[in-house]
């Protein structure tokens, strides 16, 4: 997940999470109805209006590719154009549900959870997992490179894969986690019931409430239109 | 006033290795105390004792008394000690958790439950002191900036005692000046700063007190100039000058960027067959990038690189290329993967007999049945060099080969590399910050600055280059 997609002013993380759930549920439930496409377009525009333009625009080619793939598979399986449109609407609903997540800096989410008294071990653990992914990617790249320099470049041999890639990788993992554990502890982190504060705490504001209410109103309208 | 005091301290790790044996040491408020000594002598162990990492997080047998800010560490948990002692560990890159600089700096303040306005002030002050932009993304920072970030994260917590374990490892001259000046200001404001560092050339001038650690004992250094001279004693070259030869590698106008940062700026260089070329320069000047480009681990963006090592190797960095070009990494952990030291060296060796010879030459006989990953960093370094050298490469690229070696080990390593060079007539390119073996590993030196080759020279120029860092009498 890249921070290039992060919104400058994302909505309150838990509202964003709720919005994702609502869009996902409503989009899938009403996917068979043609009108759902207007609802999904409206949701996309709503996100755009609230400053999610980076992820909204980045989503378009990915959504197009995913829709084309599922449309092709669905048509091959059912030979029905109606089913194809249903599959496309489902794909779009899933893509839109992902949008608040990819636009949100992880630290905002964990700070929102911290205010709700979620244990610090959980929130810090989430942060570390998120920061670990790119670090591990870099480590694997370095080890692969070192393997080549020692003449152990092929990954097709299980022996080479185990010895030259997995052994140094495991050793590095232990080293990294030891260092990280020491670092957070010497910076005062502990898991017991000790007081702590939150830097730049994340709170819900009027803008966030308007965002969620607008989305709920649109979703209710869709449900009424399709099912009542 | 004494901030930290160790009285008759003995410490042995769980595995039985005694590192400190009857240590008496103290550090005062208002001073920068430098702890110097060879790698593996126990500098980090001593700092870990002061920071409470030992015995709270690292097990071992501890005797004697360690007092920090008037209280014994034996009676305190890490959470209590870290409120008195700020600790900057090695490997800054591995310690960063947050995406944005200010969030990383604020982490310690959050843990100490500081009110938000206080945190705001401290984060801003620590970032300003370390010359960091609070809004910058942590993943885009250079190695030196990451080191300053972790230091800022500790300084923001506001403890009056600060210990720093080799904080200059990734810093160039300017970065070092920034950090050491900031620490000097803290000392002037009454802080106790304890710094462990082996780059005496960079840090000696800023230190108020100097202690040496060797063979489990810590002694206070009175004659700093004599001490510096003894530590910096150069190893004598024993290799005759190479004969005039044809180039093995030829670089013209080579450029390399990472993102928007141009790291190599029009490099023109010929590497001649059979010579020992030394690359010198401050951190971040492009030495390692140049080595990686020469090793074909990075592709140049512009310019021409011609090789005359093996015509059939073409332009690919494949098996054939690395059979001729040996690369020794700065961090040996990446290159060691066999179950024993002996098999590690046999892996690339031309024959078992030659592997045996290399084991003897590098004095690895006693370690030959050990797992390479179980060795100390200095031993790993020796094994990784031996394993690469065993394949008898025509071109040997060594990135900081002497890190973690004590003086005797350094002399032996230098002599073995020289012996192999003389016997195989290989070409050696070495990058080092270590002044002691520099002249003995050099026929010709290249001096780099800000991505360019400023000049080339011989051993005398290498000597002058390192002498320029000799410390002034007093800060």
Image (cartoon, helix red, strand yellow):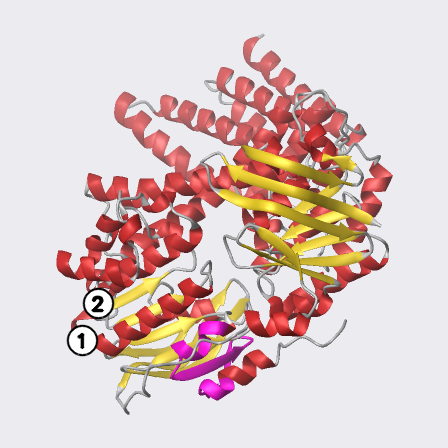
Is residue B417 in view? yes
Q: Examine the structure image and report whether residue B447 is included in the region drawn in magenta.
A: yes
The image shows residue B14, relative to residue B170, as above or below, that is above
Is residue A44 in view? no
Residue B327 at x, y = what percent? 33, 64
Determine which residue is flagged by label 1: B311
Residue A155 at x, y = what percent? 24, 45
The image shows residue B174, relative to residue B406, as above or below, that is below
| Chain containing mark 2 | B
Q: Earlier in the sequence, mark 1 or mark 2?
A: 1
Q: In the picture, which quadrant includes the C terminus of chain A?
A: top right
Residue A119 at x, y = what percent? 66, 21
Report helix, strand or loop for mark 2. Answer: loop
Q: Examine the structure image and report whether residue B105 is included in the region drawn in magenta.
A: no
Q: In this picture, which residue range is highlighted in magenta?
A: B436-461
A196 or B336, nearer to the observer: B336
Residue B97 at x, y = what percent? 60, 41
Determine which residue is flagged by label 2: B392
């Amino acid at each position: 997940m890249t921070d290039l997609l992060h919104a400058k002013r994302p909505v309150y993380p838990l509202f964003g999470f709720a919005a994702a759930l609502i869009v996902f549920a409503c989009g899938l439930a009403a996917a068979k109805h043609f009108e759902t496409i207007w609802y999904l377009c409206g949701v996309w525009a709503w996100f755009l209006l609230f400053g999610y333009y980076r992820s909204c625009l980045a989503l378009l080619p990915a959504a197009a590719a995913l829709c084309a793939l599922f449309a092709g598979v669905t048509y091959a399986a059912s030979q029905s154009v109606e089913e194809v449109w249903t599959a496309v609407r489902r794909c779009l609903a899933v893509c839109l549900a992902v949008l608040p997540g990819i636009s949100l800096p992880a630290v905002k989410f964990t700070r929102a959870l911290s205010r709700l008294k979620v244990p610090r071990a959980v929130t810090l653990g989430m942060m570390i997992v998120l920061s670990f992914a790119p670090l591990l990617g870099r480590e694997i790249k370095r080890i692969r490179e070192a393997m080549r320099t020692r003449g152990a470049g092929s990954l097709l041999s299980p022996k080479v894969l185990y010895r030259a890639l997995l052994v140094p990788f495991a050793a590095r993992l232990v080293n990294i986690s030891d260092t990280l554990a020491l670092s957070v502890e010497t910076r005062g982190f502990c898991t017991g019931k000790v007081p702590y504060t939150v830097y730049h705490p994340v709170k819900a504001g009027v803008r966030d409430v308007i965002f969620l209410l607008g989305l709920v109103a649109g979703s209710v309208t869709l449900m009424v239109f399709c099912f009542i | 006033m004494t901030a930290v005091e160790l009285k008759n301290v003995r410490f042995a790790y769980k595995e039985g290795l005694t590192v400190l044996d009857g240590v008496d040491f103290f550090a005062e408020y208002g001073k920068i105390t430098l702890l110097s000594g060879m790698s593996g002598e126990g500098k980090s162990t001593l700092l870990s004792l002061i920071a409470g990492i030992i015995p709270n997080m690292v097990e071992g047998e501890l005797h004697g008394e360690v007092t920090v800010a008037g209280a014994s560490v034996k009676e305190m948990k890490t959470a209590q000690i870290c409120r008195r002692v700020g600790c900057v560990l090695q490997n800054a890159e591995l310690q960063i958790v947050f995406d944005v600089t200010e969030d990383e700096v604020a982490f310690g303040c959050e843990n100490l439950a500081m009110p938000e306005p206080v945190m705001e002030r401290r984060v801003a002050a620590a970032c300003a002191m370390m010359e960091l932009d609070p809004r910058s993304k942590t993943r885009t920072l250079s190695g030196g900036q990451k080191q300053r970030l972790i230091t800022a994260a500790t300084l923001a917590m506001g403890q009056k005692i600060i210990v720093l374990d080799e904080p200059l490892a990734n810093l160039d001259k300017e970065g070092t000046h920034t950090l050491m000046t900031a620490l000097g200001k803290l000392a002037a404001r009454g802080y106790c700063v304890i710094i462990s560092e082996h780059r005496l050339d960079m840090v000696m001038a800023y230190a108020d007190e100097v202690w040496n650690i060797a063979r489990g004992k810590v002694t206070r250094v009175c004659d700093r100039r004599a001490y510096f001279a003894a530590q910096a004693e150069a190893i004598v070259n024993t290799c005759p000058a190479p004969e005039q030869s044809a180039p093995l590698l030829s670089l013209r106008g080579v450029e390399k960027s990472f993102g928007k940062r141009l790291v190599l700026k029009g490099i023109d260089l010929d590497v001649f067959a059979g010579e020992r070329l030394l690359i010198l320069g401050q951190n971040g000047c492009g030495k390692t990038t140049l080595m990686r480009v020469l090793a074909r681990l990075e592709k140049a963006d512009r310019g021409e690189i011609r090789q005359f090592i093996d015509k059939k190797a073409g332009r690919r960095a494949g098996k054939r290329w690395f059979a001729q070009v040996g690369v020794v990494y700065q961090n040996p952990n990446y290159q060691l993967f066999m179950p024993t030291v002996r098999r590690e060296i046999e892996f690339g060796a031309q024959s078992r007999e030659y592997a045996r010879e290399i084991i003897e030459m590098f004095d690895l006989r006693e370690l030959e049945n050990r797992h390479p990953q179980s060795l100390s960093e200095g031993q790993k370094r020796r094994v990784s060099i031996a394993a690469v050298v065993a394949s008898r490469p025509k071109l040997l690229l060594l990135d900081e080969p002497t890190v973690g070696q004590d003086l005797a080990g350094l002399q032996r390593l230098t002599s073995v590399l020289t012996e192999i060079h003389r016997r195989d007539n290989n070409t050696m390119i070495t990058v080092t910050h270590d002044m002691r073996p520099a002249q003995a590993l050099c026929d010709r030196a290249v001096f780099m600055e800000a991505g360019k080759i400023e000049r080339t020279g011989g051993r005398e120029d290498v000597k002058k280059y390192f002498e320029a860092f000799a410390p002034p009498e007093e800060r």
